[in-house]
Amino acid sequence: MRSFTRGLILQLLLGVLAFAGTLAAEPPRDPLIGTWHLNVSKSTYPGPAPKSQVRTFDYTIDGLILVAYETVNAQGNKAFAHWYLSVDGKEHPEFSRATGATPTFWLAGKVIDANTKEVRDRRVDAEGRPPLVIMYTIAVSPDGQTLTMTAKSTNAEGKPTVTVAVYDKQF
């Protein structure tokens, strides 16, 4: 009976160690994943700031992150869009309810560090004008509670513009 008990305890111990090993091998959770609410008072815009914005970042297929956002602009109009964030430099389209199945932006990202991603946002222009390119830095604070998105581009007059949108994590 003692050898049976020892064998059972040894098997249980090995099972617990194997399970703990699989937990340790699991990749760390991306701090970007979650729901974020725009903190308008901490954000800066070159033009009118939106009244509100909610962004979500969620895991999806093939290592992509599904990004969705709903904005209420300064005039009170709502807009919704979604896109896939890749971190391998491949472009993916952004779709909005306003443009339907015709994407107007193509986005590609890369990882800078565990809390920071860089995204290149290229607007497709159906009228043949040069594409608008916006470079985003998306950074999550070390405590995981604040998301800062810095967008740099050039306006129609050729002048650089910078937007800094600060978000508070909801869940």
Image (tube, rainbow, N blue to C red):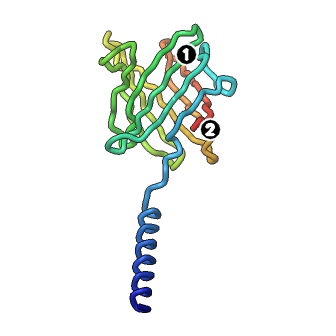
Residue found 62% across the figure and 34% down from its top: 168
- For the C terminus, the quadrant is top right
Q: Which mark is residue 40?
A: none
Distance between mark 1 and mark 2 Cα atoms: 20 Å
Image coordinates for residue 69, horizontal then vertical, percent: 48, 25
**Disc 2 marks which amino acid?**
Thr
Q: Earlier in the sequence, mark 1 or mark 2?
A: 1
- For the N terminus, the quadrant is bottom left
Image coordinates for residue 43, horizontal then vertical, percent: 64, 26
**Nearer to the camera, 9 or 32:** 9
Residue furthest to the right in view is 41
Q: Which residue, given by chain and number where applicable, does mark 2 sit on?
A: 146
Is 91 displayed left or right of 117 in the figure?
A: left
**Disc 1 marks which amino acid?**
Val
Residue 100 higher or lower than 94, as above or below: above
Q: Residues within 10 Å of mark 2 (few under 14, many from 20)?
A: many
Residue found 61% across the figure and 16% down from its top: 51
Residue furthest to the bottom in view is 2
Residue 38 higher or lower than 169, as above or below: above
Image coordinates for residue 96, horizontal then vertical, percent: 39, 19
Q: Which residue, given by chain and number where applicable, does mark 1 sit on?
A: 72
Dot 2 falls on a residue whose secondary structure is strand
Residue found 56% across the figure and 31% down from its top: 150
Q: Residues within 10 Å of mark 1 (few under 14, many from 20)?
A: some
> So how many labels did they put on this image?
2
